[in-house]
Image (spheres, rainbow, N blue to C red):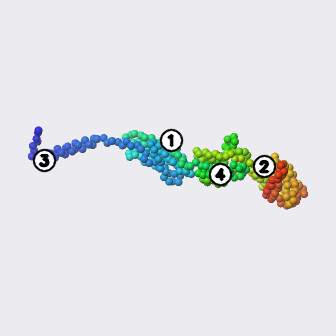
Amino acid sequence: MIYFKSRSGGHFIGALLIILITVLAFSSCKKDYVKYPYNDIERFVIKDANGADLKASIENDNIIVYYPPFQTVPDFINPQITTSDRATVEPASGTKVAFKTGTAFKVKAQDGTVKTYTLKTYLSAPTPTFTISDLPYRLGTDVYLTGEFMNPDTTISKLYMVSQTNKEIQIHSSSFTQFTASTLFFTIPTSVDTGSYRIKLKTGDQILTKGPIHLDPPFLILNVPANTTTVKRGAELVLQPVNGSLKYYTSQISSQAVFYKPTAISVNVTSITNAELKLTIPTNFPLGDINFISLKFKDGTEYPINFDNVQIIE
């Protein structure tokens, strides 16, 4: 064993300790730190249509979002994403992305490993239901649907009448008189033909069909042209349909009609088309206002028609 002798032995030992500590410190600086291997999405939040936070469920590599019922579903979202410590996500948190199933997010850990998450969207709206009476309806009258969970947003809910040949006729929202979650009232357009139809309500991807119902011709409603205020004795009085109804009755109307002033006065029906009906006013017809006539049908029945006042003159 070798011993070092020195007058200042304590100073020598202290110097050796300083050198040893310096070497150890230098060695420790040379060590490599382990990089973080974590690449998880820990939180994924979007805003619903009302501005409230909507938190996704993270299950394995799926980001599951249940969107609230009766709200307009956005095409794009700006999700706020929280990841594992020292990980990054692409697209970055807050970036505008498509709100649809299949949108992907890649999370990269500090050590370079990557995990891909896939967005899955679900509408949490319950399935709409409705009922409808099987009684006959007339064109131009209202139909009443009553039910539950119907979505009154007409950008999402679409209504159709489906013919026996499966032809779909959309009933536009302009025909709706009331639309809530439990009621949908609409007027049957007179442009639709008579016959049997099913009622189809499409709400997003949800489709409900009921029926059939039968549509009868509209009520016969006639009026004088807007510029007609007087008619001379011996001239023709023209009546026109206000709802396209005359075409359904042309073959049923006889050649006679009756005015009551106050007793019955028969007049001749001189012509009938889908667009107008013409009557000849007798030369001895009483002067004054008229606004009512009873059309005679070939089966012997009479059909009363009210119209705007017209004055019979010489």
Which residue sits at x=23%, y=43%? 24
| Residue 78 place in picture, x, y as percent | 49, 48
Which of the marked residues, 3 or 2, is nearer the chain's N terminus? Answer: 3
Specify which label sits upstream in the sequence, 2 or 1: 1
The residue at which mark 2 appears reads as 246
Query: Which residue is labeled 3 in the image?
Result: 10
Q: Is residue 259 above or below residue 39?
A: below
x and y percent of residue 142 in the render? 69, 52
Depth check: give the residue in front, 150 or 239.
Answer: 150
CA gap between label 3 and label 1 equals: 74 Å
Label 1: which secondary element: loop
Q: Amino acid at mark 4?
A: Leu
> Which residue is the site of mark 1?
102
Q: Which residue occupies the extreme front position in the image?
A: 134
Question: Which numbered disc, 3 or 4, marks the residue closer to the eye?
Answer: 4
Question: Residues under labels 1 and 4: Cα distance?
Answer: 36 Å
Mark 4: few/some/many CA within 10 Å (<14, 14-19, 20+): some
Percent position (x, y) of residue 79? 47, 48
Secondary structure of the residue carrying tag 2 is helix
Q: Which residue is mark 4?
A: 145
Q: Residue furthest right?
A: 284
Q: Earlier in the sequence, mark 3 or mark 1?
A: 3
Q: Earlier in the sequence, mark 1 or mark 4?
A: 1
Q: CA distance from mark 3 to mark 4?
A: 104 Å
Q: Which of the marked residues, 3 or 4, is nearer the chain's N terminus?
A: 3
* Quarter of image, res 92: top left
